[in-house]
Amino acid sequence: MYDQPRTNPVPTPTAAADGSEASDIPIGLFRDCVALRDWLLSEGARLPESGDLLAGMAERLNDLGVPVDRATTAIDALHSDYSGVGRFWTREDGVSFRLFPHGEASEKALARSPFAHVYATGEWLILDLRETPDDRFSIVPELKSAGFTHYITVPLFFTNGTKNGVTFATRDPRGFGDDDLAILRFIVPTLSAVMEMRGLNARLDHVLRVYVGDGPHQAILAGFIRRGQVERIRSAILFADMRGYTRLTDALPPEASVELLNTYFDCLVPPIESEGGEVLKYMGDGLLAIFRESGDDLGGAAQGALSAAQAALRRVEEANRAGRFPTRIEVGIALHHGEAAYGNVGSGARLDFTVIGRDVNLASRLAKLNKVLSEPLLMSKPFVDFLWGDPELLGTHPLDGFAEEMAIYRPGKGG
């Protein structure tokens, strides 16, 4: 029944700029279709959230007479926690989104969906839902119960090889007519290009954030990439490492060693992030984080670092008691306050965005005293100068590579 248009198309010889056929679009609507395409490429492409882009497109399609009551996109993601992002727009509820986790459950859901079909065929799938059996695809009963009559699934194949898609659904008893399909076929290539651009930006943003940390990733995206560039930051500095890591992992296979490290870092990182810290480097079993000074609250960074360190030690002990490690582990944490410097170092086309400077080196040397003094948490004199409370002095001690001895502290009984 949907082979007949809701209005008779008026052919026009004009073709879309991307080469897609535009001859079936009514001439009275062609200018508005071009305006929608231009909106996708300009204002829509600059919207901060892809869900807003989807909503804006759906609303403008309705303005053109295309009876879209539901539109969705499914975009592949390069993310450590999920494999894709689904965005949903409905006329009544607006925009929502869903993350598709890695694993078998998401793969099975995809296999039962219309997306698997269009990925395999490379063609649009257009369903009259009133004539489609419930068992054709897993989503069909849901769409029918919500009153939808016509459903379109379109594959979007990005240039990086990923498979993505967009869907349109209507409750109109007449379904989507030929005019509607012509408009959608005209718009979809532009939508695909814009979604690919946004998807690539999201991938780059996440990968940089995961591998270099939040602050450095922002600096890199802002163009801080020339070799020799340095940015200085006043901050509290936290350095942590696992005591006896080499001995502990000597007999473990690589998979078990990785699991041990991930469990260990799961104890350390959440408290750091919850106190406003940034993890800048993982170095084997070592971790370097900073807590930036904020305005006039110079003591806030140090207090946040101390709270994070104490919470991390508690979490390690809880994990030890719960048997989450193959053997009991101990952690040493050192806290210092000073200047950390981001720097681009390396040679040729391979640079590393790393943290350098005297105070970073001092924090790492201080961590070596944890084992010597049998203390899980040590603080330097410059660090305790920013603290409230009454830390306990452990004496002055030499630090490898530094000429002067340093007064070393541990938290007092009340702190």
Image (cartoon, grey):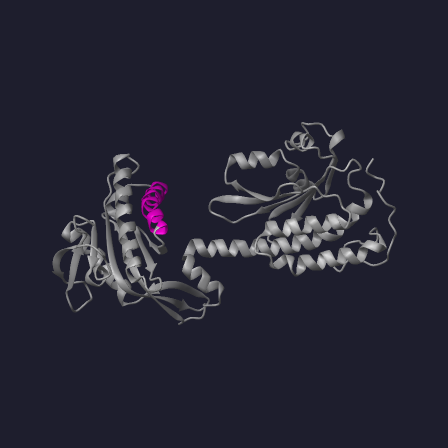
Is residue 114 placed above or below 390 in the rendered structure?
Answer: above
Picture residue at 72% right of the left edge, 57% below the top: 37
Relative to 406, residue 410 above or below = above
Prevailing secondary structure of the magenta residues: helix
At a point 67% along the width and 53% down the height, the residue shown is 191
Q: Is residue 347 visible?
A: yes
- Position of residue 330 relative to residue 32, above or below, is above
Position of residue 404 in the picture relative to residue 57 (left or right): left
- Quadrant in the picture for residue 399: bottom left
| 174 vs 33: above or below | above
Closer to the camera, 321 or 89? 89
Query: What is the x, y in percent for residue 240?
Result: 27, 52
> Position of 310 compared to 108: left or right?
left
Please state, as top left, top right, bottom left or bottom right, where the N terminus lies in the image: top right
Front residue (pair 412, 113): 412
Please provide percent x and percent y for residue 120.
67, 40
Q: Is residue 55 a member of the stretch shown in magenta?
A: no
Indicate the quadrant where residue 281 lies: bottom left
Q: Quadrant of residue 165?
A: top right
Residue 28 is situated, as x and y percent measured from the top left of the image, at: 84, 55
Stretch of the chain drawn in magenta: 254-274
Q: From this viewpoint, is residue 250 visible? A: no
Question: Residue farthest to the front?
Answer: 296
- As rendered, which of 205 and 147 lies closer to the eye? 147
Residue 338, how many percent across, how many down? 27, 65
- Judged from this view, the residue extending furthest toward the bottom is 228
356 with respect to 347 (left or right) = left
Q: Is residue 52 left or right of residue 223?
A: right
